[in-house]
Amino acid sequence: MKKITPNFSALFFLFFAAQMQAQTVFVAQNGTGSGSSWADATGNLRAVLDNATAGTQIWVKEGTYRPTTCTNCVFNDRNQYFQLKNGVKLYGGFGGFESNINQRNITAHPTLLSGDINQDGTLANNSFTVIFTQNVSNLTIVDGFAITGGNADQGGAGLGTPQTSGGGWFNLGSTTGASSHPTIRNCIFRENYAWGYGAGMFNDGSFSGAANPTYTNCQFIGNVARDDGGGLYNTGSFSGNCNPVLTNCQFIANKSELSDGGGMFNMGQLGNSSPTLTNCLFDRDSAFNEGGGMVNFGKNGNSSPILNNCIFDRNVAELGGGVFNDGTTTGFSGPQFHNCQFVQNHSMNDGAAVYNSGYQGTCSPTMMSCLFENNYAGFAGGAMFNNGNEGVSSPIIRNCKFIGNHTDTYGGALYNFGKGNAASQVSGNASPELTNCLFYNNMAYSAGAVYNLGAELGNANAVITNCTFYSNHAHIGGAIYCNAGENGTGVASPTLKNCILWANIGEDEGNVFRIIWGTPTISNSLVDVADCNGLYNGNGGIVNCAGGMIFNQNPNFVSPASGNFHLGNGSPGIDNGNNPAITQTGVGIDLDSLPRIFNSTVDLGVYEFGSMMGNTPIVTQSPQSQTVCEGEAVTFSVSASGAQPINYQWFKNGNMISGASQNVYSISMAAQSNAGNYTCVVTNGAGSVTSQAAVLTVNAPAVVGLEIVASQTEICTGETVTLSANPTNGGVAPVFQWFLNGNAFGGSVQSFTMNQLQDGDMLTCQITSSETCVQSPAASSNTLTIHVESLLTASLSIAADAGTVCEGNPVTLTATPINGGNSPSYLWTLNG
C-alpha cells in the first residue's frame, strides 16, 4: 500500500508567513515548530522553500532531508524535488546553536539533501532529481550540503529532462531570454545517477539561453551517467551560453558508463560552453569513449574553457584519458591550460592526457607551464594526440615538461597527425608550436618524444624552439619522427631552433631523427652526432642543417640523472642561440620563469644560464586573438612574473578600458563595437611592459533560411516528384528534417523523390544550420501543396448519319470520345 504524505506546505503556511518577513527560517530534522528559531525549528524543508521569497535565508541543522517520503513510490513521488526560488539563500552545516553564519562547522555537522525517498539505502525508486532551479540569479545560494541519491533513470522521458539528467541538481536556463546562475559553495555531489546527462548536476543554457553557475569549494564524487558528464554536464547548444566558474573544486571517481566526459562534459555544439576552472582536481574519473576527466565539445560551435592550476590525475578513457577537446565539423575548441598537471592518465587508444580533434574543424588549445608526467596511451600519443585530419590541430605549447610518458606504438609524448583528402583536395594540419619545452625519458616503439605524420596533402610541421630532448627511447626514432606519407604525399617538415638533443636512443634506427620522406630543418642547436649526415636515418627526404649547429659537444647539464637540465659553467649551449627565433614566439621567460635572454644572447635549451629575476615585470603569456559571433562571451588573459605587487590595465585600440584592472578581461556578450586590438600594460614599482596585441573579430550572426522546390506540383496518381531543399547560410553540414502533412519522415537528405503522394498533401522542411554564427540555427521552409489527379479511362464510340447508303453517296462519321481531354488527337482507319 502506498504511504500517503500530508501536504505540509498548506499546513505550515501561516507559521511561515510571519517568519518570511524576518528573512531567516530555522530547519531541523524532525522539528515541529514554526521555524522562528533553533528552539522552534520546523522539520519541513520543502515547505519552507516553497513559501520562501527573495532574500530569505534558510538555516538547516545537520541531518538528512528528502523532498518527500513514500513506501511503494510511483512516478509522481519520484518527480518531487527541492526547488529554490530566485534570491533564496539556503545554508547547511549548522549544529543547531549558532547565532552567526560564520559559526558553522560544515564538516562536523553534515547536512544531506537526499533523493532516497523510500529510505532503503539504494538508488531504486529514488527522486529523479534532488534540487531544481529555473531562471535564478547569482543571489540564489546553496552552501554547505551533500546532495546525494538522485536517480534520473527514466530513459523514455527524453534526454535533457529532469527525469533523465541532473540526478543531483537540474539547473534550467534554456530558451531565448532565460538564464539561471545559482551560487553554489561548500557542496558535495555524491553518488547520483543519470540515464542521460550530468549525474551530479545538469546546467542547461541551450536555445539562446544562459546557465552560468558559480561553484566554490565543491566536490563531485562517485556520480555515474549512462551518457555524458558523470559529474557535471554544461550545455550552451543551439545559440546558448553555458560558462560556469569553478574554484577549488574536485571531481573524483565520476563515470560515463557508455559515452564521454567522466568528470565534466561541456556541450558547445551550435553554441558556446566555455567554463573557467581554477585550482580544480580531476582524479580517477573515467569514460567509456572520450575524455575520462573532461570533454570540451565544440563541434559546429565553441567549447574553449580556461583552466588555471588544475590537476588531472589517473583519469581513464578510450581517447583522451585526461581531456578530450573537440573542434570538429567547422567547430572550434581552443581551451587555455595554465600551470596544469597531467599525471598518470591512461587512454586505451590515443592521447593519454589530452586528445585534440580538429577533424574538419579547428582544435588548437594553449598549454602554458604545464606538466605531463607518466601518462600512458595504448596506441599513440603518450601525453597528447593532435588530430588535424582534414582540419587543424596545432596547439601552442610553452614552458611545459613531458617526463616519463609512454605508448605502445607512436609518439611517446606527442603524436601530430596532419592528414588531407586527395579526392576532395582538402588539406589537414597538425603543426604545434613548442617553446621552452622539456622532453625527458619518454618512450614509444616509434618516436620516443614526438611523431610527426603529414599524409595525403596533410602537414605536420611542428615549430620547436628552445626545447631540450634528453633520454627519450624508442626502437625507431629516439627523439623525433618525420613521416611525410607514402612517397611524400604529405609534408612532415618540423623546424627546430635553439634546441638541445642529447642521449636519445633509437635501438634499431635513428637516435635523433627518423625520416620517411620528411624534411626537418634544424639550426642553432646542439646534437650528439658528428655532423649533419649523422642526423639522417630513414627513407627519402633529407635533414636540413642551417647555421649555428654544434655537433658532439657535451651540453654539460648540471645533473641529468636527477632531471636537472640547467646548463653548467662552460656549457657550449650558453649564448649560442638565435635571438629572433625566441623573440618571434613572444615568450619572454625560460622554464624557470626567469628572463629568457640574458647577457644579450639567448642560450640553447630550456634554461637561461645566469638569468635572475629583475624588478621590471615580464609578460609570460600574451592574450590570444579570437573570432566570435555577436552575443558570445570573450575572455582575454595575460600572465606575468616579476616583483610584487603587479598591476594590470587593459587597453582597446590604445584607449584605456575603465575598470579592467585584472589579469583577465571578459566580455559577457560581444558586440560589433567590441572588435579591435586588445593589449594589457603590466606594471610594478620598477616599471611596466605591454603585452602583444590580441585581435578580436566579432561577426554579425547570419540569418538561416530554407526554400523547397518540387519538379512538379500537379501530377497524376503514381507519378514521381523530385523535392529539393535550397538553404541559405546552412553551413557545410546542415541537418534537414522533412514533414508530410505536419508529420516528420525520412532522414537528413537535401533532395529525394516520391511517387506515393495524395491530392492535397503538404510538404515542408526544417533545417538546422552547421554555421556557428547565426541568429538561430533552425529555420522552416515554405509549404508545397501537391495536386494529384486520379487516373481516368479513355474510350471512343463512332456513329454514321445513315445506316445504309448507295454507292457513291456521302456518309458522315462522327467520333465521340469519353475522357478525351480538351484537344484529343484522332486517327481513323479503314479495314484496319
Image (cartoon, grey):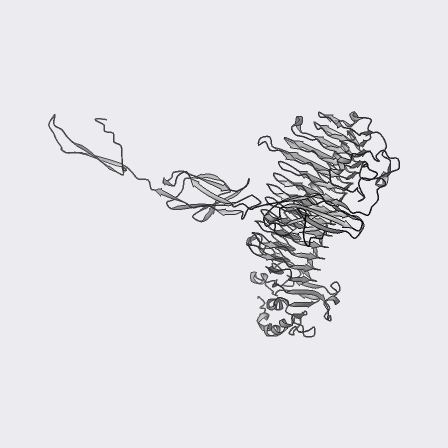
Residue 563 location (% of width, % of height)? 83, 41
Q: Is residue 322 depicted above or below 483 in this figure? A: below
- Answer whether residue 191 is visible to the viewer in this image: no
Residue 125 location (% of width, % of height)? 61, 59
- Answer whether residue 801 is visible to the viewer in this image: yes
Residue 514 location (% of width, % of height)? 74, 29
Dividing the picture into quadrants, the one containing residue 620 is top right
Q: Is residue 752 depicted above or below 125 in this figure? A: above
Q: Is residue 17 depicted above or below 545 in this figure? A: below
The residue lying toward the viewer, choosing from 135 and 509, is: 135
Seen at 11% across and 29% down, the residue is 805
Residue 657 location (% of width, % of height)? 67, 51
Residue at the limit of the structure toward the right, as seen here: 569
Q: Quadrant of the C terminus?
A: top left
**168 sits to left or right of 575:** left
Seen at 61% across and 40% down, the residue is 361
Residue at the limit of the structure toward the left, as seen here: 806
Seen at 66% across and 70% down, the residue is 24
Q: How many labels does the image show?
A: 0
The residue lying toward the viewer, choosing from 700 and 327, is: 700
Q: Is residue 632 depicted above or below 432 in this figure? A: below
Q: In which quarter of the image is the N terminus?
A: bottom right
Dividing the picture into quadrants, the one containing residue 389 is top right
Residue at the limit of the structure toward the front, as seen here: 655
